[in-house]
Image (tube, rainbow, N blue to C red):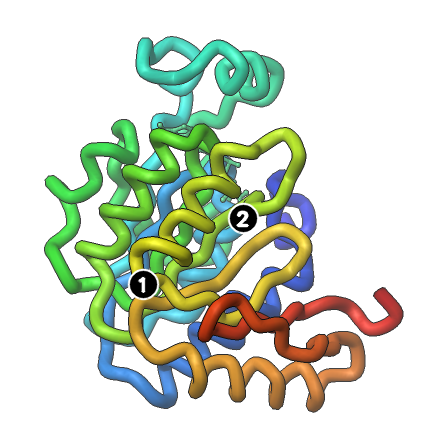
Amino acid sequence: MTYDDIPGWFYPIDQAGFAWVLDFQNDMTPPGDLLELGTFMGKSAILMGQKLKPGERLTVCDLFEDVVTWDGVDQTEKAFFGSRTPTRQQFEANYRAFHPCLPEIVQAPTGTICRHVAPKSCRFVHIDASHLYANVREDTISARQLLQDNGVVVFDDYRKPECPGTAAAVWEAILNDALHPIFATDAKLYATWGDPEPLRAAIIARARASDWCRTGNPVAIRDMQIIRLARRGK
Ligand SMILES: C[S@@+](CC[C@H](N)C(=O)[O-])C[C@H]1O[C@@H](n2cnc3c(N)ncnc32)[C@H](O)[C@@H]1O
C-alpha cells in the first residue's frame, strides 16, 4: 500500500503545511502531544504520526462505524458518510502499514475528548470531525484547553459553501476569542492562541525554498494578519 492509496481529503498542499508546522515545532518548541478530531481512514493521522518525537503521543478521536448510527450525528452528515462509512479496522490497518504501533484511539464523539487528553498537553490539534457549527465550536473550545502555549490548531473546510457552520465557528474564535490566524490553504486554516509570527515566517521560508509552493501577501484582519499558502501558478 502507498500513501496515495489511502482515501481521504488531505491534499499535498496541506501535507506540506502539516509537515512544515510539525518540523518547525520539532526544532523550536518544547515536546507536546498531537491530537486529531476526525480521522476517517487515517490519511492525515499517518503523517502526524511520522512527526512524533520519542515520548510524545498521538491521539485520534473518531466515531468510525458508529458515525452512521449515533443519535448525535445530524442526518446530512450521516448521509455523507453513508456510502463511505469509515471503520476502525480499516483505520488500524492503514495506520499499521506505515507505523509499528497504533496511536491512542478514542472511538467516541469529539465532545468527550477532554475526558481523554490532559489540559495543555498538546502542541498540535487538527479539527476535522463534524462540520456543524455547534460541534466545531465545542471542538475549538476543547482545543484551546488542550493546547500548550504557542500550540497550533488546524481547521478543515473553513471556507466551503457546504460548511457555513465551520466558517462561523472559526471566525468567531478569531474575532472574539483571541485566536490568531497564521496561514491558510484552500482547505484548511492554521491558527494559534500564542504568537503567530515565528511560524508564519518559517512557512514563508519553506514555501520559498520549495519548487512548487508559494505564499501570498499578508492580508490584515483587525490587528492580525494571515497569508495564503498555495501551489505555484494557482
Ligand atoms: C472529513 S473526515 C476526516 C478526514 C481525515 N482527517 C483525513 O485526512 O482523511 C471526518 C471524520 O469525522 C468523523 N466524525 C464526524 N462527526 C463526528 C463526531 N461528532 N465525533 C467523532 N467523530 C466524528 C467521521 O466518522 C469521519 O471519519
Residue carrying label 1: 178
Horizontal side of residue 125 vs 14, given as left or right: left
Most extreme residue toward the front is 222
Q: Measured from the top left, where is residue 65 in percent x and y? A: 41, 20
**On the image, which quarter does residue 9 sit in?**
top right
What's the amino acid at mark 1? Answer: Ala
Q: Measured from the top left, where is residue 188 in percent x and y? A: 56, 54
> Element under label 1?
loop
**On the image, which quarter does residue 163 sit in?**
top right
Q: Is residue 112 above or below residue 124?
A: above
Horizontal side of residue 145 vs 234, given as left or right: left
Q: Measured from the top left, where is residue 172 in percent x and y? A: 40, 48
Residue beneath the point at 33% across and 54% down = 176
Q: Quadrant of ligand 1?
A: top left
What's the amino acid at mark 2? Answer: Lys
Horizontal side of residue 176 vs 40, given as left or right: left
Q: State yes or no: Cβ of the residue under disc 2 lies below 8 Å from any atom of ligand 1.
A: yes
> Element under label 2?
helix
Q: Is residue 93 visible?
A: no
Along the viewing direction, whichever of 224 and 3 lies nearer the viewer: 224
How many neighbours does mark 2 have within 10 angstroms: few (below 14), some (14-19), or many (20 or more)? many
Residue carrying label 2: 43
Q: Is residue 149 above or below residue 64?
A: below
Label placed on residue 86: none
Q: Is residue 61 visible?
A: yes
Q: Nearer the viewer, mark 2 or mark 1?
A: 1
State if disc 1 and disc 2 touch (CB < 8 Å): no
Q: Is residue 78 above or below residue 144?
A: above
Residue beneath the point at 40% across and 61% down = 49
Residue beneath the point at 67% across and 82% down = 207
How many neighbours does mark 1 have within 10 angstroms: few (below 14), some (14-19), or many (20 or more)? few
